[in-house]
Image: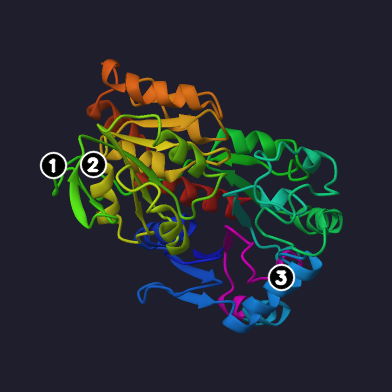
Amino acid sequence: MKIVQINTVCSTGSTGKIAADLYYIAQKAGNTPFIAYGRGTSPKEINSFKIGNSLDFVQHVLINFFLGKSGFGSKAVTRRFLKWLDEIKPDVLHLHNLHGFYIHVEMLFEYIKIHHIPAVWTLHDCWPLTGQCAHFDYAGCAKWQSACQKCPIYRSSYPYSLFRDNSRQNYELKKSAFTGVENMTIVTPSNWLADIVRKSFLKEYPVTIIPNGINLDIFKPAAPQFANTVFDIANSTFVTVPKIILGVANVWTSRKGLDFFLRLSGLLDSSYHIVLIGVSQKQQKKLQKEYSGRITLLTRTANQHELAEWYRRAHVYMNPTLEDNFPTTNLEAMACGTPVITFNTGGSPESITEKCGIIVEKGNMNQLKEAILSLDKKTEITSLACRERAMEFNREIRFKEYLKLYNNSLKS
């Protein structure tokens, strides 16, 4: 079976790692997989096709900035990609993130409809069913249920349209393009997103829930290689801290909960220390002096072994996200034996049980603090229970569900 996955990136970031893991599992099962991607690079061992290029990316970004048309640029590179698909003749197309300024979505879906290719579409966010944004929960917007218009966050939320609100037209164009596919299944990692899909214009398609999977050979309990020391940049010295509160994100924003970490640093005594991974160099420069001694700010790491070591060193992994689909970081922390504290928002609490973490009211700072302080008293929360829960998300088991889905789509 020839399987072509399409995603913004290949083997990097959360969605790129998912696509790469699926590639290896499909290949191991005797299939012929490919990954088509828009940005960055691909590992040499992956049979891949790069759709976009630097010039096209800039042009697509500018089209969105000035006209608000994310997903409706990149005509030339999309045309070249579709010619490549003609040569490959895939049995199944597996779509992931189509936003990211690298592909023309109308052309892609017209191709799928004309060639009657079975398709699987994994939604990693809400962009496919809105006229503008990838996440609307933070803004409290429900216009996507009827027709997006007068978008309240078109300037402030990715994909940013700085000069024009084109949400109504985008909504109608997406609805026309994304509906009417003869054989397509929607996959969501969370029940939360599945319920949203069933209320959207994508409700005509069957929805399957396949949670994200993780590599349990990398993310596992072990004796930390380093003591609980952190580097104090302001004083150029290492400081020993008893309890590390860890936060991890690709990009730290208010939506991801950065403000809660900053506020929390002033509410806890010196026995706690916050470590944030994924801050930009600009954020690091801006915040490190003010929060020196209370927060260690580290830039993003692509080294999963290094990340696993931080999970193991942490007393607790805190994820105060204000909107999210199904955070893989929660699973990675639990796989390393570290409990999780998260807000009751989106799909973030779906992986947490009373034996491996605490769920608090969305945005409640006091509950967040109390959850951290009460963690030691909750004897039912153990490292073993965290690991056992994470084992339910073994990528080998979870991603084999996709292979069954591919075969069912072919039979249809």
Residue 85 among magenta residues: yes
Q: Nearer the viewer, residue 16 or 151?
A: 151
Mark 3 residue crowding within 10 angstroms, few (<14) / some (14–19) / many (20+): many
Query: Residue 307 at x, y = what percent?
Result: 30, 52
Q: How many C-alpha atoms fall within 10 Å of the one at disc 1: few (<14), some, or many (≥20)? A: few
Q: Residue at x 78, y 47 (%)?
A: 152
Above or below for 392 versus 235: above
Query: Is residue 321 or residue 328 the one in the foreground?
Result: 321
Residue 399 tag number = none
Q: Give the alpha-carbon distance from disc 2 to disc 3, as whole Å.
A: 42 Å
Disc 2 and disc 1 in contact, CB within 8 angstroms = yes
Pointers 2 and 3 in contact (C-beta within 8 Å): no
Which labelled disc corresponds to residue 223?
1
Q: Which residue is mark 2?
A: 312
Task: Depth check: give the residue in front, 72 or 398.
Answer: 72
Q: Residue at x 16, y 42 (%)?
A: 222
